[in-house]
Amino acid sequence: MSETVTTVIVVVALLAAMGLLSAVRIIKQYERGVVLRLGRLHKDIRGPGLTLIVPVVDRMRKVSMQIITMPVPAQEGITRDNVTVRVDAVVYFKVVKPADAVIRVEDYQFAVSQMAQTSLRSIIGKSDLDDLLSNREKLNQGLELMIDSPAVDWGVQIDRVEIKDVSLPDTMKRSMARQAEAHRERRARIINADAELQASKRLAEAAQQMSGQPSALQLRLLQTITAVAAEKNSTLVLPFPVELLRFLERAQPESDQAAPSAAAGTPAPTGGGPARSATAGAARSRTDGDVAPTFRSAARAARSAAEDEEEAGAPFSGALPPDPAAPLRDPAMVLPELQVTGLPTAESARERARGGRSEETAHSGHRHRHHGNRA
């Protein structure tokens, strides 16, 4: 009898111990316990620590109150400016109402994940590519609002949403690289142009200052030579004054004007009495076309006659051809050969034939000199 009583007591103790163990629950600090008694929500939300429930009657679910970091899978979409991109993000949220997170939604984490993906795709379609790349804070705020609106009813609070990466096609990357390169090149050219403008203004001021002090330009030239000579190289620097170039530029038009006048054969007086000056003035009143062609035709006739005589081998026995331009020519311009009177010898005729060309050249040079004196 005593043994049976002892056995019953042991069994009851074991059952009591098992019941007590099944009724004891330990809740961690970051958790809360939601109790369902006979399928109905119990009003009391169990806090952290040791708590007891009624075995077989009560069911308790623990809900974490920590902030949960959930990565959003990369979503492909087309932006508003028709660019295909691939965007991934991350969501930070936490449960603020454990009872709603258990009762109102089957799996709040899965629900938040799906809502984040759909919201991300919606944000991609509403945004431009430039906004996705440079204005992410605004997009993050919009994405947070889109996810937080339905999550409030689930007892979940969205802490923040961040877009991690935006992947672009390779063709778009190359296009953007060319655009960025062109933009930087444009900025570089503008900066160089501004520098040139400022430098030109400074140089103009420096030139104005040096124009009052010519020695300053000479000192600057010496400084430049010193800077070049400081380097160990084989460069030879020969300063060339700019004034010489300006002098040559001024002298070039004068020589261009003097050449046509000398070619026209206009005689000019070299000096003398009043009669010579009057004769020279009368000769200048004639046109150059009346004097020079006549003199050249007479000289050619004389040379042809001398050549004929030389070929025939007979002495020259005729008279010199008259000079039709003699009345129009300045006496100072008369060549020594035309002042000889009488009949020339055959030897003088041959010498005249040889020196015909040299005489014409000398006469042309003589006219050049007289034209220069008149100028």
Image (spheres, rainbow, N blue to C red):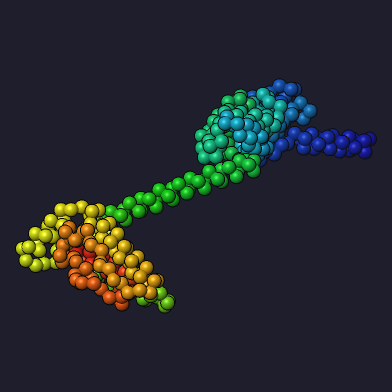
Taking 17 as reference, is 104 left or right? left
Query: What residue is at 40 percent from the left and 74 percent from the top?
Result: 235
Q: Is residue 247 left or right of residue 51?
A: left
Residue at figure coordinates x 31%, y 75% from the top left:
346
Expressed as whole percent of the image width and height from the top left, the position of residue 332 reads 15, 66
- Given residues 157 and 273, the one toward you in this image is 273
Q: Position of residue 266 (x, y in %)?
A: 21, 58
Q: Nearer the viewer, residue 29 or 15?
A: 29
Locate residue 139 relative to residue 50 in the image: left or right: left
Pick the quarter of the image with the N terminus: top right
The residue sitting at 22% across, 58% down in the picture is 324
Q: Is residue 129 above or below residue 351?
A: above
Q: Is residue 167 above or below residue 222?
A: above
Farthest left residue? 274
The part of the image, by quadrant, that contains residue 155 is: top right
Q: Quadrant of residue 54?
A: top right
* Residue lying at 68% horizontally and 37% vertically, measured from the top left: 73
Kindly indicate the quadrant of the structure image that contains residue 372: bottom left
Q: Quadrant of the C terminus?
A: bottom left
Q: Is residue 69 above or below residue 274?
A: above
State whether residue 59 appears in this view. Answer: yes
Residue 322 in the image: state x and y as whole percent: 23, 62
Q: Residue 2: x and y, percent?
A: 92, 37
In the rendered image, is residue 112 in sight? Answer: no
Q: Nearer the viewer, residue 215 or 324?
A: 324
